[in-house]
Image (cartoon, rainbow, N blue to C red):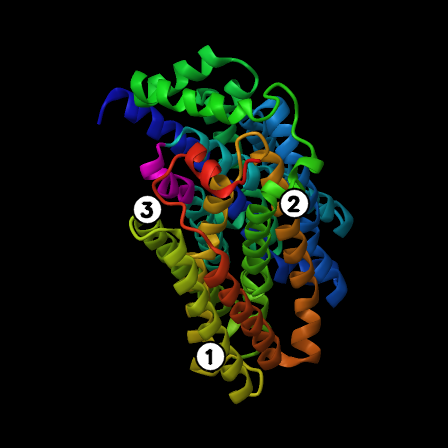
C-alpha cells in the first residue's frame, strides 16, 4: 500500500469511528434502563420517554447537520458530535434526578444526528468509486461494533457486581451500576475528538467553496494527481449546474429533476425504521427481563449480547459484499429475509402466548437483526451518499434522515403500547407487512449505484433539463 493510500485509509477509518461513538453511547442505555427504572421509580410512559428522548434530538440534529456541514465543514460537525457525546456521558453518570438524565439523553441525540449525516457524506466524498460502498459501510460497521461493545460493557458490569475485591467494592457497582454503564461513554468520545485533529476537511466541501487548490491537494495526497484532476473536472461540471458558492435550499429538493432520487431515498429511509429494528435493540434487555423467561439479570443481558453479536457479524458480511454484488441485490434479498424473520417472530409470540420462551421467537429476532445488518442497516447511508448531486447532497441527506429519525421516534414510542395491548404476535406481524410492502417498492424502483463516480451517478439518475 502506498503512503497516500495508507493516509487515505487512515482518514476514512478515523471518520468512520464516529459510528462507534454513536452505537456505543446509544446502546449503553439499553442495559442501564432496567436499573434507572428502579432508581427513579419510573412509569411505563417515563420509560418510553427515556428511550425516545434520545431519538427526538437526533431527529432535530439530522435536519440541522446537513446545512451546518455545508456551511462549516463535515469535520467541524463531527467534532461537535464528539463533544456532545462526551458531555452527555458525563452528565448521565452524575445524574441526581430523572430530569437531568433526560437532559443527558437529549445531548446524546444531537451527536447521533450529526454522525449519521456527516460521516457517510465525508467518506463518500473522499473514496474512489470502486471502494466507496465498502468505505461508507465502515461507519455502520463501527456503529454495530459500538453496540456490541456497549452490550458487552453492560454485561461485564453486571457480572462484576458479584465479584468482591477491594477495588471493585470501592466502585459501588451494586447501587451505581447504571452510572458506570453510562459514564464509560466519556472515554471513547474524548479519544475520538483528539483523533479528528489528524483529519483534513472533505475535498468536495473545499471545491464547493471555491477552494480548488485545497481540494486538489487532499485528493492528490490520497489517490494521486491523475485521480485528483479527473475528480475535480467532474466536480466542477456538477457544481456548474448550480451556484457553487451558495447554500442549497429546500425548494431545490422539490425540483422535478430530483423527485425520482428523493422518492427512492424517502422509501428506503422509511423502510429502514418502520420494521422496528431500533425498538428491538432499544428494548431487548427489558423484553427478556420482563417476560420472566430468563433467570436473573445476567441471562437477559446475555441474550441481548447475542443479538449484538449477530448484528456485528452480519455487518462485516455486508462490508465484504456491497462492492462485489452491489447495493440492489443486498437490499432486495435482505428485505425479503427481514419480512420472513418478522413472520417467524410473530408466529413464535403467538404460539408461546406472547412469551419469548419459544425458540421461534429468538430465532426470528436473530434472523431479523442479521438480515437488517446485511442490507438496510449500512445500505441506507451508502445509497443516500451516492444518489444525490454534490450541491444538494448534505441537505437531501438531512431531509431523508429527518424522516428516517421521525419514523424511528414514533415506532419506539408506541412499541411498549403495542406489546401490551396488541401482543408480540400482532406487533411483529405489522412490522412484517411493512417489510413486504417495502420489498415490492424496492424491486420496482431501486437503482444499482455500484462502481460509478458520484458525478456519473448524478448524470444518470438526475434529469437535467
Q: Secondary structure at mark 2?
A: helix
Residue at the image point whose x is 59% and y is 29% from the top: 77
Q: Which mark is residue 19?
A: none
Is residue 108 something one can see in this rendering?
Answer: no
Q: CA distance from mark 2 to mark 3?
A: 29 Å
Q: How many marks?
A: 3
Residue at the image point whose x is 67% and y is 69% from the top: 416
From the image, tell me which residue sits under label 3: 323
From the image, tell me which residue sits under label 2: 58
Magenta span includes 112: no
Q: Is residue 277 above or below residue 27?
A: below
Q: CA distance from mark 1 to mark 2?
A: 31 Å
Q: Which residues are magenta?
A: 128-138
2 vs 3, front mark:
3
Q: Please state which of residues 35 and 150 is positioned toward the viewer in this rendering.
A: 150
Q: CA distance from mark 1 to mark 3?
A: 30 Å
Magenta span includes 133: yes
Residue at the image point whose x is 55% and y is 82% from the top: 355
Residue 138 position, x and y percent, is 40, 42
Secondary structure mostly seen in magenta is helix
Q: Is residue 299 above or below residue 463?
A: below
Circle 3 Cα neighbour tier, 10 Å, few/some/many (<14 / 14–19 / ≥20): many
Q: Which mark is residue 344?
A: 1
Q: Earlier in the sequence, mark 2 or mark 3?
A: 2
Amino acid at each position: 500500500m502506498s503512503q497516500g493510500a495508507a493516509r487515505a485509509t487512515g482518514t476514512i477509518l478515523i471518520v468512520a469511528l464516529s459510528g462507534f461513538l454513536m452505537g456505543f453511547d446509544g446502546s449503553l442505555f439499553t442495559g442501564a434502563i432496567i436499573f434507572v427504572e428502579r432508581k427513579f421509580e419510573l412509569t411505563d410512559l417515563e420509560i418510553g420517554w427515556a428511550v425516545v428522548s434520545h431519538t427526538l434530538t437526533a431527529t432535530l440534529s439530522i435536519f440541522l447537520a446537513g446545512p451546518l456541514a455545508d456551511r462549516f465543514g463535515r469535520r467541524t460537525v463531527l467534532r461537535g458530535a464528539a463533544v456532545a457525546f462526551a458531555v452527555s456521558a458525563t452528565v448521565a453518570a452524575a445524574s441526581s434526578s430523572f430530569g437531568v438524565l433526560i437532559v443527558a439523553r437529549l445531548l446524546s441525540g444531537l451527536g447521533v444526528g450529526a454522525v449519521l449525516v456527516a460521516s457517510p457524506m465525508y467518506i463518500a466524498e473522499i473514496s474512489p468509486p470502486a471502494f466507496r460502498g465498502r468505505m461508507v459501510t465502515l461507519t455502520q460497521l463501527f456503529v454495530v461494533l459500538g453496540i456490541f461493545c456497549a452490550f458487552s460493557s453492560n454485561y461485564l458490569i453486571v457480572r462484576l457486581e458479584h465479584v468482591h475485591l477491594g477495588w471493585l467494592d470501592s466502585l459501588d457497582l451494586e447501587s451505581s451500576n447504571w452510572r458506570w454503564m453510562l459514564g464509560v461513554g466519556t472515554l471513547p468520545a474524548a479519544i475520538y475528538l483528539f483523533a479528528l485533529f489528524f483529519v483534513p476537511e472533505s475535498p468536495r466541501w473545499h471545491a464547493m467553496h471555491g477552494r480548488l487548490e485545497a481540494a486538489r491537494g487532499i485528493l492528490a495526497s490520497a489517490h494521486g494527481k491523475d485521480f485528483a484532476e479527473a475528480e475535480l473536472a467532474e466536480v466542477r461540471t456538477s457544481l456548474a449546474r448550480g451556484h457553487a458558492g451558495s447554500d442549497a435550499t429546500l425548494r431545490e429538493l422539490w425540483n422535478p429533476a430530483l423527485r425520482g432520487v428523493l422518492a427512492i431515498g424517502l422509501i428506503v429511509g422509511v423502510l429502514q425504521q418502520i420494521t422496528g429494528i431500533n425498538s428491538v435493540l432499544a428494548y431487548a434487555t427489558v423484553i427478556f427481563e420482563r417476560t420472566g423467561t430468563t433467570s436473573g439479570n445476567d441471562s437477559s443481558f446475555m441474550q441481548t449480547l447475542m443479538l449484538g453479536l449477530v448484528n456485528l457479524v452480519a455487518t462485516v458480511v455486508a462490508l465484504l459484499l456491497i462492492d462485489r454484488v452491489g447495493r440492489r441485490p443486498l437490499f432486495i434479498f435482505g428485505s425479503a429475509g427481514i419480512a420472513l424473520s418478522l413472520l417467524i417472530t410473530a408466529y413464535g409470540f403467538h404460539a408461546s402466548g406472547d412469551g419469548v420462551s419459544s425458540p421461534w421467537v429468538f430465532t426470528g429476532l436473530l434472523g431479523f437483526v442479521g438480515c437488517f445488518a446485511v442490507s438496510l442497516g449500512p445500505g441506507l447511508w451508502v445509497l443516500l451518499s451516492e444518489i444525490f448531486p454534490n450541491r444538494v447532497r448534505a441537505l437531501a441527506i438531512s431531509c431523508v434522515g429527518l424522516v428516517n429519525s421521525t419514523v424511528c421516534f414514533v415506532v419506539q414510542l408506541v412499541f411498549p403500547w403495542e406489546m401490551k395491548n396488541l401482543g408480540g404476535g400482532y406487533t411483529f406481524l405489522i412490522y412484517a407487512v411493512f417489510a413486504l410492502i417495502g420489498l415490492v417498492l424496492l424491486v420496482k424502483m431501486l437503482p444499482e449505484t455500484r462502481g460509478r463516480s458520484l458525478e456519473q451517478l448524478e448524470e444518470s439518475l438526475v434529469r437535467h433539463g
